[in-house]
Amino acid sequence: MNLFNRIFKIGQAEAHSAVNQLEDPIKMTEQGLRDLRQDLDKALHALAEVKALAIRARNDAETERSRALEYESKAVLLLQKAHRQELDPSEADRLATEALLKKAQHDSQAARTAQDQEKFEASAQQLDQNVQQLKQTISQWDNELKTLKARVTVSTATKTINQQLAQLDSSGTVALLERMKEKVAAEEALAESYGQIAQESRTIDQEIDKALGSGAGKAGEDLKALKARLGIQEQ
């Protein structure tokens, strides 16, 4: 069937160069699935119509066979009436003959209708197989589409991260970070150097004061002198 040509087209989605260059495989597959679902709806409608024709043919065949039996029964009744002398034998023969002709017509129509029924049922069976195959194909490609979308998501994320890493390296960010580390290390070393100088200066001042006798002793003499000026006697 022509509707299965589309399945083959979807199957070539990743291999065909037009897909790689011009078309989005996901969008193409989604469109293909939409087309397949439309074809499935049409196939189901056609299947229902053919089954309806088969049912109608079966009912018509049964009706024709029933009418044939009725005319056969009428022919028997006519002959029986003639046998009982309730009806003129020649008239009974004429009417019975007409009844049998009607029976033959209905038998012939029943046979033709039965043949039509068989054809419709065979067509319905073939359509049903196509519908089942189409349903299976749609289910398969639904799963394939989910897998394809997941693969695209992973590949897109991976590509984005790799591009960012490549841009970081190419823009010299790594080298900039190294220079910043060197600068920070230099600043830390300079701060430590100033700290050592300040410590050395304080140590020298302490040594000088000690050598000159300054500090707590001189402060005690100054306190005595201040008390003497104020007239405060030592306790």
Image (cartoon, rainbow, N blue to C red):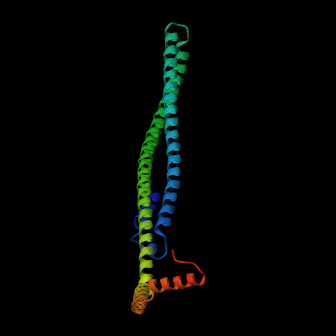
Q: Is residue 230 left or right of residue 116?
A: right
Front position in the image: 179 or 5: 179
Front position in the image: 235 or 197: 235
- Image position of 167 with respect to 104: above or below: below
Q: Position of residue 13 (x, y in %)?
A: 42, 68
Front position in the image: 143 or 70: 143
> Looking at the rendering, in which quadrant would you find the N terminus?
bottom left
Q: Position of residue 199 (x, y in %)?
A: 41, 87
- Image position of 162 with respect to 3: above or below: below
Q: Residue at x 46, y 42 (%)?
A: 120
Front position in the image: 25 or 74: 25
- Image position of 32 with respect to 169: above or below: above
Q: Position of residue 80 (x, y in %)?
A: 49, 11
Q: Residue furthest right?
A: 230
Q: Residue at x 57, y 78 (%)?
A: 232
- Image position of 15 with respect to 76: above or below: below
Q: Quadrant of residue 156?
A: bottom left
Q: How many marks?
A: 0
Q: Position of residue 89 (x, y in %)?
A: 52, 13
